[in-house]
Image (spheres, coloured by chain):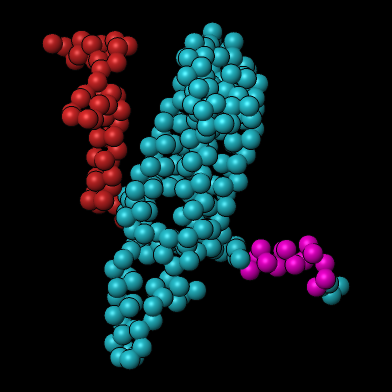
Amino acid sequence: MSAVDESNWTTAVRDRAVDAFPPTELLPDRQPAYVASWAYVFGMLSLVSLLVVIATGCVLAVEGPSWWHNSGTGHFVNSMHLWSVELFFVFMVLHLWAKFFMAAWRGHRQMTWMSGAIAFVVSIGAAFTGYLSQQNFSSQWISSEAKDGLNAAGVGSYFNVLNFGQMFTWHVVLLPLCITLLVVGHVLMVRRRGVVEPFDDDTVATVATVASTETHVDPKPASAVAE
Amino acid sequence: MFPSAIIGGILDGRQRLVSWGWLQITVANLVVIVAMIAIFVVALVAPFPKAKK
């Protein structure tokens, strides 16, 4: 067996990846007791909705507008795409509410919070370009209304909502790619930092620290100490 | 009135608005927001099924 070459960049990347995401933490078979609540389910429901959005979107992209407007199966898949997007936003907002009220950015999780917030904003853009890509009177109406606002903002020449080809490419390539990368990064950060503890755990840990030292109060929450 | 008639009246394609002072919102959006708040509250208080040992 040959010795490991430390100067090899693939070795360095692999070592860093395994250090950051050990397989047991990347795909854990146990969870903290406090996640046994329906309030912790909305993130996974958002993820499942996104998978349905992407799967149905792939079918629509393969078959094209005449299929989704004129065939029964096309209508069905088109509706699946629409309603999975609706559910995606509902669950994403519920997930955001839950994480906001539990201050889920505690314990060095600020990047997790921000990546989720950015994914939410990019998703709005993806939904908007989706409405513009319907190829019907509704999309014409929305694009002709939206162009005035975007022109007033000074971005109309770069982001032309009346250009179907440009909007369709944003909708099926660029924005899904952005959302996928953001969501994968978001989930990896959750795996790395773990799910945020309830407030009570922090309170108990801080009280215990104060009681044990009497003179020293550790300002860091229990999650940061554990790291 | 039969439930089908009520549902048919709601889903007739017309947009209905609720106005309260400066606030004006479509019934459809209001229903979605109220449903989301209800789901959120239920998620906080409903017991979570325990894992089988």
Q: Is residue A57 visible?
A: no
In the rendered image of this protein, does residue A171 appear above or below residue A36?
Answer: above
Q: Where does residue A207 sit, x and y in percent of width and height?
A: 29, 80
Front residue (pair A171, B41):
A171
Locate residue A31: give its quadrant. bottom left
Side (left or right) of A104 relative to A186: left
Front residue (pair A57, B48):
A57
State the residue at coordinates (39%, 81%). Answer: A218
In the rendered image of this protein, does residue B30 appear above or below residue B9?
Answer: below
In the rendered image of this protein, does residue A86 appear above or below residue A137?
Answer: below
Residue A15 in the magenta stretch? The answer is yes
Question: Which color was chain B given?
Answer: red
- Residue lying at the far right of the rendered structure: A2
State the residue at coordinates (20%, 14%). Answer: B6
Side (left or right) of A192 relative to A219: right
- Residue lying at the far top of the rendered structure: A70
- Residue lying at the far left of the rendered structure: B1
Side (left or right) of A215 relative to A79: left
Q: Where does residue A194 sit, x and y in percent of width and height?
A: 47, 63
Q: Where does residue A123 sit, x and y in percent of width and height?
A: 50, 37
Question: Which quarter of the figure is the N terminus of chain A placed in?
Answer: bottom right
Question: Which color was chain A given?
Answer: cyan
In the rendered image of this protein, does residue A20 appear above or below residue A167?
Answer: below
Locate residue A133: give its quadrant. top right
Q: Main secondary structure of the magenta part?
A: helix
Front residue (pair A46, A115):
A115
Side (left or right) of B1 relative to A37: left
Q: How many marks?
A: 0
The magenta stretch is: A6-19
Q: Is residue A100 visible?
A: yes
Locate residue A220: give its quadrant. bottom left
